[in-house]
Amino acid sequence: MELNEIDDDIEAFLIESYENLNQIERDIIELEKASEEGEALVRVYRSLHTLKGNCGFLPFPNLESLAHAGENLLSCLRDRTIAITPDIISTLLQTVDSIRQILSQIQATKQEGDRDYSELIEALTRLSEIKQTPKPSQSHEPIVNIQTPQIDTEAQKDTAGSESVNNELTEISTQTTSESAYIRVNVDLLDQMMNLVGELVLARNQVIGFSTKFKDNGFAATCQHLSLLTAQLQEGVMKTRLQPISSIWQKFPRVTRDLAIASGKQVEVEMDGADTELDKSIIETIKDPLTHLVRNCIDHGIELPAERVACGKPSLGRLFLRVFHESGKVNIEIGDDGRGLNLERLKGRAQQLGLVSAVQAATMSESEAMNLIFLSGFSTAEQVTHLSGRGVGMDIVKSNIEKINGTVEIHSQQGQGTTFKIKIPLTLAIIPALIVSSGGNSYAIPQASLQELVRLEALNTIEILYDVPVYRLRGNLVPLVYLNQVLQQDSVSNLETLSLVIVQVDNYRFGLVVDTIEDIQDIVVKPLGRQLKALSLFAGATILGDGTVALIIDVVGLANRTGITAKQKQLLNENAANSQEQAGDRQTILLFEGPQGARMGIPLAIAFRLEEILASAVGKVANQDVFQSYGQILPLIDLEKIFSDSDAFSTRGLSATRCANANGGLRQRNHFNDEALPTVAETLQIIIVSPYSELSVGLVVDRILDIVEEPLTIKGIPSRPGVLFCAVIQGQITEILDIETVIRIANPYLLQLATHG
């Protein structure tokens, strides 16, 4: 056999062995659950038998001997000549670790190595020779109970030889059919495809840029079709890079068991949403942070059994992991029902370590006190152990999550537990971003960091407080950062107006002053060259539709560079005083102008995004107007049709369109239909709302007015169908819409899909 053929065989052997080993480790943990003991034993036995058999074709005698010893012990367990004990589980897990060591050595050198595993083989042999009658274990070892969603199946009690053979043949046939639906693809090839799709997205953006210059309906329609196909291809290629988060979570039961035994605790693990998929690069980035959070919950959160019983809790601690999609992001929650965070103890410990002063500790909010655990060098452990006490880990967790444009929040209640909530993007390759300009250059700000956009007509609204320029946004002081000053550029903006981009960093926000605000578009993230990687202000670069290069602003790096964190703390007391003066049942409302100039509003919580689209981009499916938004086809509802007189209703298209005139204003245009097609220049202002997680629709409005925060203390009865109530906002009567009723009037079928799937 030639050398390259041997290398190919070893590579195939390693791939299959690692897959078998991961399954073996999960099943060994499941052996501690009596309900799945039989099934798990069979799977572990077959996997080890397969691994041992594959060793017979390759010169790996040590690995074969170790697998054979483990197989003998599992055979005794399967035949029920010995009972499962914590010692047996620990020895089997040690066997898995040793096999993984050998596989790593083979992968690196194509040889097994000279490490001696004779003691482990003797321990496996000794355990398999101890004949005993199975009986319930009375061991005082810590309990680790793993709970995952189960599929109800009927247990097969018949052990007749013929049925066993038939079951095995059926299983082999099923596995063969299942495996034929999948192929192995090199990750480098997927990365190359992703890069090509990124270049296609850039070319798509350039073509769409040309379409705005030529008033040709046919060319505009072709561009829209190209955009749709590109979005579908982009989505398909991204799906090939997705991996379920279970590839990380499958290791947590083992980690939990080892930590529980080491710390003398009893832990129950609950996992929900393990099939949620993420981009492979993000999976690799969050693996270590999530593992550290699990360790932190067990080591610092969950109490010892005696302490839990004394507090009236069950001795079995609860560790939960949840993941779900929300608002275009992946939300991960890791928490426990332990002792929670003692804020006074955190403040005192931070002062002992010299991380904060007594004045800072006294003026801290609850959120700031909780975030002390993310400071480098902070630890509440009194002595260093192999689990904690060194003051490193949580700061690394935060920095790694922020590197992928994610955020970490802490929710804790003393005596009831702590939950870490992480929000991360689905992918890092292609992201939506706001394009702005400063000093004649273009820059991109990731949409994940955006809060809102503000245009100031009067510069006297800028105040100076503690030598910091601030803007009073709905009663809260927001510190300002001038991008041209940070980049040492000359401003080319109009001195009569200011454009503010309100961005969020951690639990505070600031306003970024730019020259102009362009548009939101999908950008392809390109890494910076070696010479520019040291610049903390930028996270990468992209190519815009006109071919120019735009640097992507790292909002966290910008905040650190300008010292905005310290400025925000100075303004904290001022904002606290303002909030006390304005206390009440306040709600954040998005205001807009509706049909016939009516002043309307909706809760900002259900407003997902604001867009401006070409009227020519609106299509029709049956009697429902639709449009494309970020790779999705969304229903479109024209409020003009909802709130106009009944005789004005039409099913031939949007009842009216709004187009930008030469002065930038908006004017009403006559109804268009199939015979009177709109021109390319006509645009519609859209509010995308999501009343349910499964339903998003676009509302066509006349004009976006403002975002306000009001107590809504003065309310009136609904004025017409589709209105929830009337309220006085900024001294004017405003209709607050009932989005669910609006959708029901427009198309009741949409609500049926959202509520019943």
Image (spheres, rainbow, N blue to C red):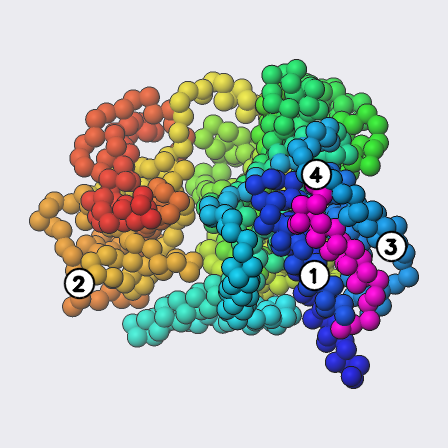
Residue position for label 3:
117
Mark 2 vs mark 3: give the one in front. 3
Q: Main secondary structure of the magenta part?
A: helix
Locate residue 728 relative to residue 17 in the image: left or right. Answer: left
Residue 383, percent across and down?
Answer: 84, 28
Going by the image, does 312 lie left or right of 3? left
Q: CA distance from mark 3 to mark 4?
A: 29 Å
Q: Give yes or no for residue 189 being in the magenta stretch.
A: no
Residue 673, numbered circle: 2
- The kind of residue on which mark 4 rests is Thr
Crowding at mark 2 (Cα within 10 Å: few <14, some 14-19, many 20+):
some
**Residue 635, position as x, y percentages in the image:** 30, 54
Between residues 192 and 134, which one lies in front from this camera angle?
Answer: 134
Given contact means CB atoms under 8 Å apart, are the residues at marks 1 and 2 in contact? no
Q: Which residue is mark 4?
A: 133
Q: Residue at x 39, y 38 (%)?
A: 604
